[in-house]
Image (cartoon, rainbow, N blue to C red):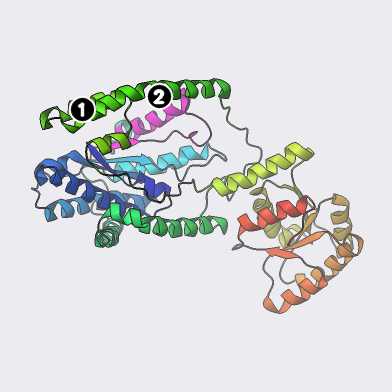
Amino acid sequence: MVLASGCPYHDAGASAVQELGLALAAGAEYIRALIDRGLTIDQAAPRVAMQMSIGCHFFMEIAKLRASRLLWTTLIEAFGGSEESQKLKLFARTSAFTKAALDPWVNLLRNTTEAFAGAMGLVDGLFVTPFDDPVRPADDFSRRVSRNLQIILQEECHFTHPIDPAGGAWYVETLTDQVAREAWGVFQAVEKDGGLARALLAGKPQALLAQMAEKRRKNLAIRKDVMVGVNLYAHLGEKPLASPDADWEDLRSERIEAARAAGEKAGTARSSLESLAGQAAEGLMAATIQAAKAGARLEDLAKALGQGEPVEASALVIERASRPFEDLRANAQAILGKTGRRPIVFLATMGPASQHKPRADFSTGFFEVGGFEVVAGDGYPDVDAAAKAALASGARIVVLCSTDATYPDIVPAFCQAVKAVRPDLYVVLAGKPAAEFEAAYKEAGLDDFIFIQTNCLEKLSLFQKISQGGSAS
C-alpha cells in the first residue's frame, strides 16, 4: 500500500484546503509512478491510500475529509479508472499541530473534537494522538485513553452505523463543495508546475505553507484564534506531567555501537548492491530486500536500481502552533528558578469594582499567558493611593486599570506621580486610548498600552525583559 499523506503539510501549518490539494497531488504522483512501472490504472489506484490530519475546526475538517473522496473519484476517473477503483481508502490522525505541552489535559478535549470530526468525515481508519505526546513518550494511561475515545465513538455513539452521518446538512454539503473546489485549484496549480515532486524541488509548496503558518502564528499571537491554556486562560498552577528520565549516556553508547555495527555491515551491503545490477526482474525484489537487510541505505538502493542521483529539496518547517508560547512560559519558569519568583506585574485598579474589574480581569489573563505573577490592587479611590501602592509593590511594571471616561483625568496624574519617584517604572495602560489622548498620555510618562488585538506574544516577551531590568528598546 502506498500512502499519499497530507500530514506533513498540515503539521507545517497548511490550511484544510492546502492539505487536501497537496495530498491529492501526492496521490497523482504515485499513480503516475505505478503506471510508468507497468500497472494499469485499475491495478494502481487500489494500491494508493490517503492519510489526513484532523485539525480543531470541526465542520471544516468534516468537509475536508468528505471532499477528499469526491476529489479522489474525479482524479481516478480522469486517469480512466473504473468505478470500483475510484473508491478511496482514507486514513486520518488527530492533529499534532494543535497539541500543546502547556496544560496538556486540554489535549483530551482537542482529541475528542478531532476524532468526532473524523467519524463524521467517514475515515476508514483513525489514529488518536496520545494527549501527552508533546510532553513525553506516551504511557499506558494516555494510550488507553486514546483507544477508549475511538471505542466510545464507534461502539457507544454508533457513529459508524450511518452511511454518511453528515450528509444532507446544508452547511456541511455547501462547505464540502467549497473545500473541494478550492483544493482542486491547489492541485491544479501543483500539476501546472509539473507535479508535486518538481514543485517541492522548486520550493513552491514550502513557500506557500510558510506564509500560511505565519498567518496562523499571528492569529494566535493577537488571540484571534484561541488555544485554551496557551494564549488564553493560562493555568500557572498546573502540575507538570511526570516524564521518565532518559539515560542519555546509555543512549549515546547504544547509538555509537549501532553506527559501528552498520559500518561492519557496509562490505556485505556493497556486495549485495552489486548483485542488483544484473538481476533478472523476477528476482529483483528479493535481492533488494536482501541488500536492505544487509544494511544498504535507501540512497544506495536507488543508485543500484538505476534511479539516478539523489535530489534535495528545502524541508518543511514543522512546529506545533503552541511552541512560541511554550518558549515564553519556559522563560518565565527560568526566571522563577533563578530569582525565586515569577516576573511580577502590579495592577493599579482605580475606583469601584464595576469601574476597574473588566480591564483588571483582562490584564490578569493577558499577563498570566506570559507566566507573570499578577498582583492586583484593591480599587484605589484616588491617584495618590494608587501611586503609593504601585511604588510599594516593588514591581517593575504597573498596569493602570479603569475606564476610558476616567483615563483623561487619572493617567497623566498617575504617570507623573510614580515617575517622579521611580523614573524606571514601566507604566502600561489597560485599553487602547483614543487618538486625541494618546500623545498626551505618552508625554505625561505612559510607556505602553494593551488591548484586545495586541500581539501578546511580542508584548509579553518585551515585558519579561523589562521586568528583569532590561530596556524597552
Above or below: residue 261 compared with residue 428: above
Point 33% across, 25% down: residue? 295
Q: Quadrant of residue 192?
A: bottom left
Splitting the image into 4 quarters, where does residue 274 fall?
top left
Q: Is residue 368 magenta?
A: no
Q: Position of residue 79 (x, y in %)?
A: 12, 53
In the foreground, 404 or 393: 393
- Toward the viewer: 158 or 139? 139
In percent of width and height, residue 175 lies at: 30, 59
Q: Nearer the viewer, residue 448 or 159?
A: 448
Q: Is residue 222 visible?
A: yes
Above or below, 327 relative to 443: above
- x and y percentages locating residue 69 in the rendered image: 22, 49
397 sits to left or right of 220: right
Instruction: Tell whether 103 sits left or right of 411.
Output: left
Please report the bounds of the magenta region as a residue range: 125-154
Q: CA distance from mark 2 to mark 1?
A: 20 Å
For label 1, the SS is helix
**Residue 430 visible here:** no
Question: Which residue in the structure is indicated by mark 1?
Answer: 275
Residue at screen point 33% across, 23% down: 267
Kindly identify the amino acid type of the residue bearing the numbered disc 2: Gly
Locate residue 136, reporting x and y percent: 52, 31
- Amino acid type of the residue that numbered disc 1 sits on in the rendered structure: Ser
Q: Which residue is mark 2?
A: 263
